[in-house]
Amino acid sequence: MANAAPPDAPVPTLAVPLEQLRHLAEELRLLLPGVRGELTQWRRTPTGTGVVGEARETTKEFNRETFWRRFNEAAVTVSTEATTLTVVFSRLPLPSPQETQRFCEQVHAAIKAIIAAYYSLPKDQGTTLRKLVRSATLDIVDGMAQLVEMLYVTPTQSPENLISYNSVWDACQKVPKIPRDNKAAALSVLTKSVNLVKDAHEEMEQAVEECDPYCGLLNDIEEDNSDNHGDEEGILGCPNNQDSYWSEEDQELIIPCLALVRASKACLKKIRLSVAENGKKDQVAQLDDIVDISDEISPSVDDLALSIYPPVCHLTVRLNAAKLVSVLEKALEITKASHVTPQPEDSWIPLLINAVDHCMNRIKELTNEVEL
């Protein structure tokens, strides 16, 4: 007598293909740490496929055109596989287990190919360039993993699936726009830093001009919560009235802080200009050093900008200003000692150092009663 399956044994028609997608998503997630640089040696995925770690030094001559052609083609393949997978899992009936296995293998192979292309970029081509390529690779791998997860969770058509697919497609479309050498990569990163500091400076100026640190935010909230006007502790989550505005001492201290941020913007602009005019593609180490220290300017500006909002702690302002000055002076000294400043004795660097020191001295004068 043939064995009959128990009543609870039947497996839903969708179960096997969706389970295959779940395993694929897990495998793609396992690839991410290696791309981030957390893994530096071979590891095994559930399917037994190995993933190589960080790029190793090589004596083989690097061909830039070959690399970018390979990387671009890999991105196109990923985009194509993302489209195919989204289409076949956005309608019923879903693919058979055999078809799903083939789709999963193609996706996995496409992702491995773009990771391998990233690893083929030697470290001696520049850290700044490799970071940009790594970031693009991570966006693609992470985007594909999210897409597969969404198709597993919500098969057939759904807005979430379309959003996830667009994320992968956008990441792949950005690959041809990546700078092609370390100098171009350095200029790209420096331009981003200039824009970030410019935005911070404009926000600070706007707040100072309006004499309203929170740009009317509290007034809007107070109007929306007029029924709570009898609460002595103020509106939940918002500072009390005495902590909402600048004192005269605060306003006086803000002036040199604003000047210091303005000097920071000027420093970044001059550094970027020097790299654009004098930077050499083969001087990758010096360009990386300039970018690394310059990359610290924007976060330091943000720390100083945030510390001038009420209630102002003058000690915090002074410490954040000192940290920013230290970063600026180091960035200027590294730039001065590099090939992008051919005549350091006649350069603009001493002028900016004097401007930065002047701002810091004024901040010290206005906070001379603060216990450090």
Image (tube, helix red, strand yellow):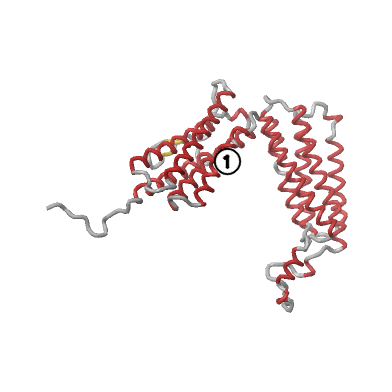
Inspect the image, locate mark 1, and give the three-letter code of the amino acid beneath it: Asp
Residue 274 place in picture, x, y as percent = 78, 31
Q: In the shown orientation, is residue 24 left or right of residue 79?
A: left
Q: Which residue shows up at 54% across the image and 21% down it?
A: 60
Label 1 sits on residue? 170
Image quarter of residue 369: bottom right
Other-residue count near label 1 (Cα within 10 Å), few / some / many at <14 / 14–19 / ≥20: some
Depicted 232 relative to depicted 177: above or below? below
**Furthest residue toward front:** 92
Depicted 204 relative to depicted 78: above or below? below
Residue placed most toward the observer, 70 or 247: 70
Residue 323 place in picture, x, y as percent = 75, 48
Name the image quarter holding the C terminus.
bottom right
Q: In the shown orientation, is residue 323 left or right of residue 44?
A: right
Residue 168 place in picture, x, y as percent = 53, 42
**Furthest residue toward left:** 1
**Furthest residue toward bottom:** 230
Q: Which residue shows up at 78% across the image and 70% down it?
A: 241
Q: Which residue shows up at 79% across the image and 44% down it?
A: 264
Q: Which residue shows up at 80% across the image and 59% down it?
A: 314
Depicted 191 relative to depicted 243: above or below? above
**Furthest residue toward top:** 61
